[in-house]
Image (cartoon, rainbow, N blue to C red):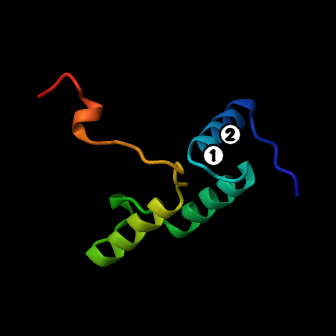
């Protein structure tokens, strides 16, 4: 099966897939479709049970690749001019 997407949509999808560490554009699009079919992991998805919301939030975090090195994301490193 072949699906034709506009150049704009293709470029956006490639950018997001790359920046979020997906192994391929296909993997990103497959996950996007699955999320749309099954409901997203946002507060708007109607998740009211705290444990279910946390489970979905953790699933989002697991989709992102590690940088492979330590990252200093402390407040001091992000806002060095603020005390």
Numbered disc total: 2
Viewed as shown, does residue 66 lie left or right of 49? Answer: right
Crowding at mark 2 (Cα within 10 Å: few <14, some 14-19, many 20+): some
**SS at mark 1?**
helix
The residue where tag 1 is placed is 17
Distance between mark 1 and mark 2 Cα atoms: 5 Å
Viewed as shown, does residue 79 lie left or right of 70? Answer: left
Q: Residue 12: x, y in percent? A: 63, 35
Q: Image point 63% across, 45% down: which residue?
A: 17
Q: Residue 45: x, y in percent? A: 39, 64
Quick check: 27 above or below 79?
below
Q: Quadrant of the N terminus?
A: bottom right
The answer to whether residue 49 shows anywhere in this view is: no
Quadrant location of residue 19?
Answer: top right
Quick check: 36 above or below 18?
below
The residue where tag 2 is placed is 14
Q: Residue 32: x, y in percent? A: 60, 56
| Most distant residue in the right direction | 1
The residue nearer to you, when weighing 40 against 59, is 59
Q: Image point 23% across, 38% down: which residue?
A: 75
| Most distant residue in the top direction | 81
The residue nearer to you, when weighing 75 against 36, is 75
Q: In which quarter of the image is the C terminus?
A: top left
**SS at mark 2?**
helix
Crowding at mark 1 (Cα within 10 Å: few <14, some 14-19, many 20+): some
Q: Image point 38% across, 59% down: which residue?
A: 42
Q: Do the residues labelled 1 and 2 touch (CB within 8 Å)?
A: yes
The answer to whether residue 39 shows anywhere in this view is: yes
């Amino acid at each position: 099966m072949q699906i034709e997407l506009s150049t704009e949509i293709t470029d956006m999808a490639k950018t997001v897939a790359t920046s979020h560490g997906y192994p391929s554009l296909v993997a990103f699009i497959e996950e996007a479709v699955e999320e749309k079919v099954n409901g997203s992991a946002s507060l708007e998805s109607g998740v009211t049970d705290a444990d279910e919301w946390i489970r979905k939030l953790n699933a989002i975090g697991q989709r992102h690749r590690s940088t492979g090195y330590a990252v200093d994301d402390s407040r001091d490193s992000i806002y060095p001019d603020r005390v």
